[in-house]
Image: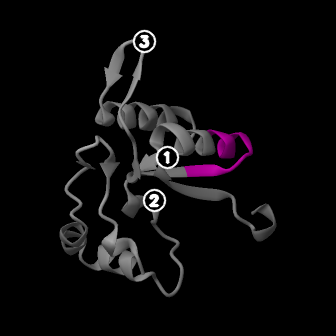
Amino acid sequence: MRERGIDELVLAGMMSQMCIDATTRAAFDLGYRCRVAHDACAAVPISFAGVSVPVEQVHAAFMAALAAVYARVEGVLMSCSPPWPDPLPRWVESAVTDPSGFAQATGDNGPAVDGGGVQKRDAKALVG
């Protein structure tokens, strides 16, 4: 990535408490500036020593820890802020020109949790 002039990474995916956490910390240690799109990440409930931790708390705890030192933790729209590629991907263009329509199209009214406790996002509009 350095050979291509990449010095800033935007991270998203699953799971917040595994790959996102480890990748962000490793990238930071390697000298990359990191952004984590918290609303494009997913978590699952976990437990330790008989204490169950709900999915929302798992996700929030890991995002808070990353935001403290390792990354700018922000929503996907902020994570994809200028400079943007030319031409813009359709989902970015839609979000910028009509944020309310983007929220409606993606169902982006906050985190959704399925019956198994997996935090999920509707990514229909994120696909070019």
Q: CA distance from mark 1 to mark 3?
A: 31 Å
* Residue 109 screen position, x and y as percent: 19, 56
> In the structure shown, which secondary structural element does the residue marked by tag 2 occupy?
helix
In the rendered image of this protein, does residue 73 appear above or below residue 81? above
In the rendered image of this protein, does residue 126 appear above or below residue 108? below
User: Which residue is at the front of the view, 51 or 100?
Assistant: 51
User: Which residue is at the front of the view, 120 or 5?
Assistant: 120
Q: Earlier in the sequence, mark 1 or mark 2?
A: 1
Q: Residue furthest top?
A: 49
| Disc 1 to disc 2: CB gap under 8 Å | yes
Quarter of the N terminus within the rendering: bottom right
Residue 110 forms part of the magenta stretch = no
Q: Name the residue that disc number 3 marks.
A: 49
Q: CA distance from mark 1 to mark 2?
A: 8 Å
> In the structure shown, which secondary structural element does the residue marked by tag 3 occupy?
loop
Classed neighbour count for the residue bearing mark 3: other residues with Cα under 10 Å, few (<14), some (14–19), many (≥20) = few
Under mark 3, the amino acid is: Ala
- In which quarter of the view is residue 76 placed? bottom left
> In the structure shown, which secondary structural element does the residue marked by tag 1 occupy?
strand
Q: Earlier in the sequence, mark 3 or mark 2?
A: 3
Q: Name the residue that disc number 1 marks.
A: 72
Under mark 2, the amino acid is: Ser
- Foreground label between 1 and 3: 3
Q: Which residues are magenta?
A: 25-34
Under mark 1, the amino acid is: Arg
In the rendered image of this protein, does residue 4 appear above or below residue 67? below
Q: CA distance from mark 3 to mark 2?
A: 36 Å
Quarter of the C terminus within the rendering: bottom left
Q: As drawn, is 107 to the left or to the right of 50? A: left
Q: How many marks?
A: 3
Residue ID at (45%, 34%): 62
Q: Name the residue that disc number 2 marks.
A: 79
